[in-house]
Image (tube, rainbow, N blue to C red):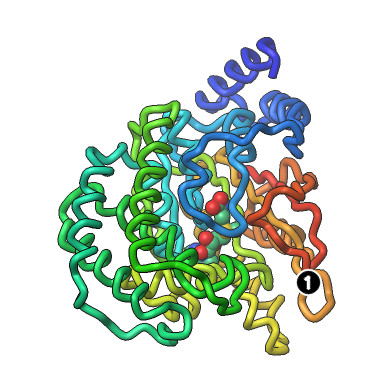
Amino acid sequence: MNKDMDERLDQAVDLLNQGRLQEGKDASSLVQDRLRMIEWNFTDRLNSHTVKAIHPYPAKCIPEIPKALLSALPMPNGTAVLDPFCGCGTTLVEAQRLGLLSVGIDLNPIACLISRVKTAPTPLHLDRIAKEVADVARHNHDPIRWHIPDVDYWFKPEIQEAIAALVQEIGIKQKNCSNDALRLALSSIIVRVSNQRSDTRYAAIYKPVTRDDVFDYFLAACRKISRALIEREWEPLLQPLIIEADTLKTDPSVIGMPVGMVITSPPYPNAYEYWLYHKYRMWWLGFDPLAVRSKEIGARARFFKQESHAEENFWDQMRGAFAFINSVLVALGFACVVIGRSKIHGQIIDNAGIIKAVAEEQGLSTISSFERVISAIHKSLNLSHANIRTETVIIFQKK
Ligand SMILES: C[S@@+](CC[C@H](N)C(=O)[O-])C[C@H]1O[C@@H](n2cnc3c(N)ncnc32)[C@H](O)[C@@H]1O
């Protein structure tokens, strides 16, 4: 962005915050200019900071998108950033880097765990504590067990024993602030030590993983997390508020601060099942994936069962999401949505069109909408079944 435009935008933001640009004319044309100057495909993006890779998450947003939106859009003074479907915290991290307060909501406890660890201060002595945990767990051949459906199919007996021993020992360290990081490290190795072929392939195969490997992988995962947190180029001074909840059932008052910017990528119908992706991670960490499944928007399996109300359901869910967004967003605040298309029973669903319609029903104005190409190397986005190559970025403003 050029300096002159930055200065003009700063002046416009000041006027806007003084209520002197209610018509939004000058600010709006500057915002449009700024948005036009961004190369939204980010073709020359370098592999950005390592903290984003501490744990896999499907369909995560690239950090360049919230970063560009936060720098291009004038956020009303004294307001926070909200991501009502925060996933692994991409928006929250970018807000934190810029010293902005933020709030994230997600139904999925693994999403919230990742977001918390990425934005928390670096835990002290994580490697040492992890070693203590692994040393005790290695000698525990009779850990506490609980019922996990089909556990024998997906995990060899000695692997189950090692994971349960780690869970038990991490639980004993409950009061320690590194507890989240230890749990995240364990979560990150669950698929690797299971019989599951890979994160997205649900076939059981033989893997030569031993009981000892579980502890070694766990220690390596802890080292990776602590290195990524230490290498952050910013101080994690402002901790986001992370709420583990169904956004559609959340009382807006829990946000507790005025929101000036929403940046989110909502779940797409028939695209991903986040609960399924993290199913055994949740079972092992003591969460109930079936409860998550029952509330997850757009879970794909539901649409395979000739669900005739799929599209109407999505309309209703997005109406709920935008009623929530509108109730917490301050006047002149922005709501930015990144969304792709879905394919349900062979028919392409224009999710962006649905989002625009429900946002406008709430009185939000569309100030910009454009397509961007989803990079083929963006591995966590694999929507080949719908042949989806682009996604839409829509920017609304509350007048
Ligand atoms: C496209 S992902 C968001 C990815 C995120 N932008 C990131 O970079 O990680 C959509 C998220 O919506 C969450 N979700 C689905 N249904 C939900 C609901 N009813 N309430 C809250 N979150 C929900 C999923 O768990 C998933 O994390």
Most foreground residue, 396 or 37: 37
Residue 342 lies in what quarter of the image?
bottom right
Residue at figure coordinates x 42%, y 29% from the top left? 99
**Residue 197 in sight in this render:** yes
Vertical relation: 237 (above or below) 300:
above
Vertical relation: 274 (above or below) 262:
below
Image quarter where the C terminus lies is top right
Q: Which residue is mark 1?
A: 343
**Mark 1 residue CB less than 8 A from any atom of ligand 1:** no
Callout count: 1
Q: Position of residue 1 (x, y in %)?
A: 69, 19
Vertical relation: 166 (above or below) 328:
below
Q: Is residue 107 left or right of residue 121?
A: right
Residue at figure coordinates x 75%, y 47% from the top left? 375
Q: Position of residue 109 (x, y in %)?
A: 40, 64
Most foreground residue, 332 or 288: 288
Specify the amino acid type for callout 1: Lys
Mark 1 element type: strand
Residue 244 lies in what quarter of the image?
bottom left
**Residue 323 in sight in this render:** no
Most foreground residue, 364 or 97: 97
Q: Position of residue 31 (x, y in %)?
A: 69, 29
Within 10 Å of disc 1 (Cα), the crowding (few <14, some 14-19, many 20+) is: some
Q: Position of residue 184 (x, y in %)?
A: 37, 55
Residue at figure coordinates x 22%, y 43% from the top left? 128
Q: Is residue 195 left or right of residue 149?
A: right
Vertical relation: 310 (above or below) 177:
below
Residue at figure coordinates x 69%, y 77% from the top left? 312
